[in-house]
Image: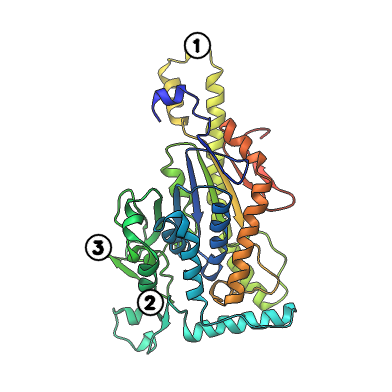
């Protein structure tokens, strides 16, 4: 932002969501984490955001979030939902919906049966079982490094993503992966990298199920091994006031487990959500502390403002505001530890509908977010809960 722009009122939004009374800052970012089959919830969020007139400027994803993100960045706005439906219909084609008794125990049995079918046969357009066990394959080959072959995903992505638009279009894309040999996390970003299907597949190459993907002589695994949320990349490269919609596929809070399947599910929720929560909370806390520093510096007498130490502190504390809106998937009672690889059409549609509903609930209660955007405050929100919570510098 130039000094002239700053003088003109940097906190005045240049646009407003057409379907919601929500002012939009210079950048609206969408953060999509990993979660396998739960990724259809993200698709519902994307559809609802578009319906509310909320334009996305930057989308960052990891694992299945990277695939959804690529479809968003690699298609014009009027085709994104159509392409997302094609993607998810392809992945769930082997397990179509059929009538069942409306009972949680029956549904849990069907849910686990569907997940077992995926383990046996794979997912159409995504991955297929290898012909021989990895232990019997030649060491060093892809066949020796995974139980499934992810080659079908490349063809699916090439069919649904316009790579030229993705790399040169108006929506910035960032996807995260882990270097197998160094263990270092790496973001591929359209501002510096030419992204194709390999980068998306690398971001979702979760071992030992899927093989590592080679890019420029280096081999990469799923970014979720290090961090399941790309929020840090957004914050580290933020250049203007930003509204972030972070789609969380694992909830931190849930009831105490009652069965062994509940234990598996709860362990997975805690493992993924705790890292996400820790990252977002720590980063937002630092932002809020810097806001306090800026507020204090603004109250200094004029004769102190040119002091070199004050100038250095002001420079270090100067950063644009960010508001993070969490859209958290909260699992049904019948969903166990296999929920992230249960690719059935019925469950996919339910996850999608839940994503749409989460955005509707958030938009209906977005006045507090709008206030923060206009005031230039930093905060995080979960407006999908009855006891909606948010954390800002006010009253802290």
**In the rendered image, is residue 147 in sight?**
no
The picture places residue 361, in percent across and down from the top left corner, at 68, 52
Q: CA distance from mark 3 to mark 1?
A: 54 Å
- Tell me whether the residue at label 1 lies in contact with that at label 2, contact meaning CB atoms closer than 8 angstroms: no
At mark 2, the secondary structure is: helix
Disc 1 to disc 2, C-alpha distance: 65 Å
**Considering only order in the chain, which callout, 2 or 3, is on the residue closer to the N terminus?**
2
* Mark 2 Cα-neighbour bin, 10 Å: few <14, some 14–19, many ≥20: some
Q: CA distance from mark 3 to mark 2?
A: 21 Å
Observer-nearest residue: 95 or 292? 95
Give x and y (percent) for residue 315.
42, 27
**Mark 3 or 1: the one toward you:** 3
Please identify, in this view, whether the residue under mark 1 or under mark 2 is nearer the observer.
2
Element at badge 3?
loop
Label 3 crowd bin: few (<14), some (14–19), many (20+), radius 10 Å: few
For marks 3 and 1, the one nearer the N-term is 3
Image-based side of 142 in relation to 28, left or right:
left
- On screen, residue 306 versus residue 165, left or right, reads right
Residue 322: image x %, image y %?
53, 40
Numbered circle sitting on residue 302: 1
Residue 218 location (% of width, % of height):
28, 64
Quadrant where the N terminus sits is top left
Q: Which mark is residue 216?
A: 3
Instruction: Tell me which corner region of the image, top left, top right, bottom left or bottom right, holds residue 272.
Output: bottom right
Relative to 3, say whether 340 is above or below: below
Q: Residue at x 42, y 73 (%)?
A: 207
**Residue at point 40% right, 66% down?**
160
- Give the residue number, with chain letter if any, for mark 2: 152
């Amino acid at each position: 932002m130039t000094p002239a722009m700053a003088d003109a009122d940097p906190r005045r939004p240049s646009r407003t969501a057409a379907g919601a009374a929500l002012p939009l800052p210079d950048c609206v970012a969408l953060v999509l984490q990993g979660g396998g089959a739960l990724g259809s919830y993200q698709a519902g969020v994307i559809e609802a955001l578009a319906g509310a007139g909320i334009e996305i400027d930057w989308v960052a994803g990891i694992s299945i979030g990277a695939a959804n993100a690529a479809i968003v960045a690699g298609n014009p706005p009027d085709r994104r939902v159509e392409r997302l439906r094609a993607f998810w219909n392809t992945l769930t084609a082997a397990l179509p919906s059929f009538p069942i008794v409306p009972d949680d125990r029956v549904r849990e049995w069907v849910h686990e049966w569907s997940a077992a079918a995926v383990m046996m046969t794979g997912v159409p357009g995504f991955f297929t079982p290898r012909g021989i066990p990895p232990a019997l394959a030649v060491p060093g080959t892809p066949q020796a490094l995974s139980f499934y072959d992810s080659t079908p995903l490349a063809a699916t992505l090439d069919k649904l993503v316009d790579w030229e638009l993705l790399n040169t279009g108006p929506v910035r894309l960032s996807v995260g992966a882990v270097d197998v040999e160094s263990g270092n996390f790496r973001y591929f970003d359209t501002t510096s990298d030419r992204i194709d299907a390999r980068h998306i597949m690398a971001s979702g190459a979760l071992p030992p199920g899927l093989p590592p993907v080679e890019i420029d002589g280096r081999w990469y695994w799923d970014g979720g091994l290090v961090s399941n949320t790309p929020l840090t990349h957004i914050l580290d490269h933020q250049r203007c006031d930003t509204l972030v919609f972070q789609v969380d596929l694992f909830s931190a809070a849930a009831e105490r487990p009652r069965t062994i399947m509940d234990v598996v599910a709860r362990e997975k929720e805690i493992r993924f959500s705790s890292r996400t929560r820790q990252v977002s909370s720590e980063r937002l806390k630092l932002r809020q502390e810097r806001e306090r520093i800026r507020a204090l510096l603004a109250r200094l007498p004029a004769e102190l403002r040119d002091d070199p130490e004050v100038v250095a502190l002001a420079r270090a504390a100067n950063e644009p505001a960010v508001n993070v809106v969490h859209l958290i998937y909260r699992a049904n009672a019948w969903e166990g530890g296999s929920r992230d690889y249960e690719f059935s059409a019925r469950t996919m549609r339910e996850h999608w509908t839940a994503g749409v509903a989460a955005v509707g609930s958030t938009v209906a209660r977005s006045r507090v977010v709008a206030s923060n955007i206009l005031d230039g405050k930093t905060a995080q929100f979960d407006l999908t809960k009855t006891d909606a919570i948010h954390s800002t510098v006010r009253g802290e």
